[in-house]
Image (cartoon, rainbow, N blue to C red):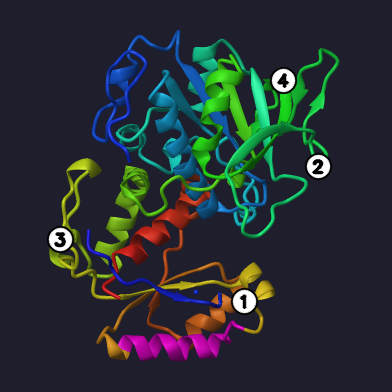
Amino acid sequence: MATLSFVFLLLGAVSWPPASASGQEFWPGQSAADILSGAASRRRYLLYDVNPPEGFNLRRDVYIRIASLLKTLLKTEEWVLVLPPWGRLYHWQSPDIHQVRIPWSEFFDLPSLNKNIPVIEYEQFIAESGGPFIDQVYVLQSYAEGWKEGTWEEKVDERPCIDQLLYSQDKHEYYRGWFWGYEETRGLNVSCLSVQGSASIVAPLLLRNTSARSVMLDRAENLLHDHYGGKEYWDTRRSMVFARHLREVGDEFRSRHLNSTDDADGIPFQEDWTKMKVKLGSALGGPYLGVHLRRKDFIWGHRQDVPSLEGAVRKIRSLMKTHRLDKVFVATDAVRKEYEELKKLLPEMVRFEPTWEELELYKDGGVAIIDQWICAHASS
């Protein structure tokens, strides 16, 4: 799909194919079931988590890094990535809604993910591996001595833990921790790895230094991209198709409130991302301006850079005039008081406002995806 402009107002504004141990190949477009059918008894499981304060987009980015690692592992052994359940994100602040232990299928299309790498949900891992036990947890950290400019090298070593572990042993000497809200989950062993380099730097260690069937990498954001911006990177990013039920809500809203449909807007789309070939610049986009209006914590950290609501509205009107648009869709985390002020200043604005039932069903993360889907289909 051609890139459609998306206005951010800061006010928040390979190597293919890898071979499996059995000699089979796994490439984008192939179902994970094709290569892993009957292999559950011998395959190994890779799990991961990130620093709790990290937001949705950073977590998506870490998934891309871990996918590169899994592709490296698949060249030697049968591995599957266990998707870390969503929950406890700072920006998900709607009260009285259960927002932990959320499976990836609530937000993403699993068949699409599986066309890139083999993945399973955490609860499938529990059922398949024999219980809520993770054989080895590695907490990733930097090197205590740091690194000197000009002497960067990729390396990984098992080292003493620098920070206090967020895991504690129970009376049975199992390790308890957050584990995505699954209180029954236990770690059998926990140790720390100092890492400096791309995600696949830990592959030799996982293949040779541990026989653990299930391995978790905590603080996985410490790993860098293997091939940022390369084919492998974009294969993984393209595979992260949003869940169909969220896309359908966004499409229905576009049609009803913004006079926008894929056919009318010249936006090609196929469910199978591996078959979608689009000429850059061919999509027109919907007849509206898409605006991401950041407030709340973004203002607190960027007070000198963030304009007032009045300033934001002036910029929005200027862009609407430039692009000859009379409709604007606004995705914002503004509090109710600011939102009411914004409506007075910009009465023609349109916003997706879920009912309580919809919010409970889609949760804050799903609503954010619906917002993003609508904005991404704007012409400007």
Circle 1 Cα neighbour tier, 10 Å, few/some/many (<14 / 14–19 / ≥20): few
In depth, the one of 63 and 158 nearer the eye is 158
- Residue annotated with mark 1: 337
Mark 4: amino acid: Asn
Q: Are marks 2 and 1 in contact (CB under 8 Å)?
A: no
Q: Are marks 4 and 2 in contact (CB under 8 Å)?
A: no
In magenta, the rendered stretch is 305-320
Image quadrant in which you'd find residue 37? top left
Q: Position of residue 152 (x, y in %)?
A: 60, 52
- Residue annotated with mark 4: 189
Position of the N terminus by quadrant: bottom left
How many dots with numbers?
4
- Residue annotated with mark 2: 163
Closer to viewer: mark 2 or mark 1: 2
Mark closer to the chain start, 2 or 3: 2
Q: Is residue 268 visible?
A: yes
Q: Which mark is residue 355?
A: none
Answer above or below: position of 242 versus 102.
below
Give left or right: position of 208 versus 137: left
Give left or right: position of 25 versus 9: left
Q: Position of residue 215 (x, y in %)?
A: 59, 24
Image quadrant in which you'd find residue 299? bottom right
Answer above or below: position of 87 versus 6.
above
Q: Position of residue 58 (x, y in %)?
A: 54, 52
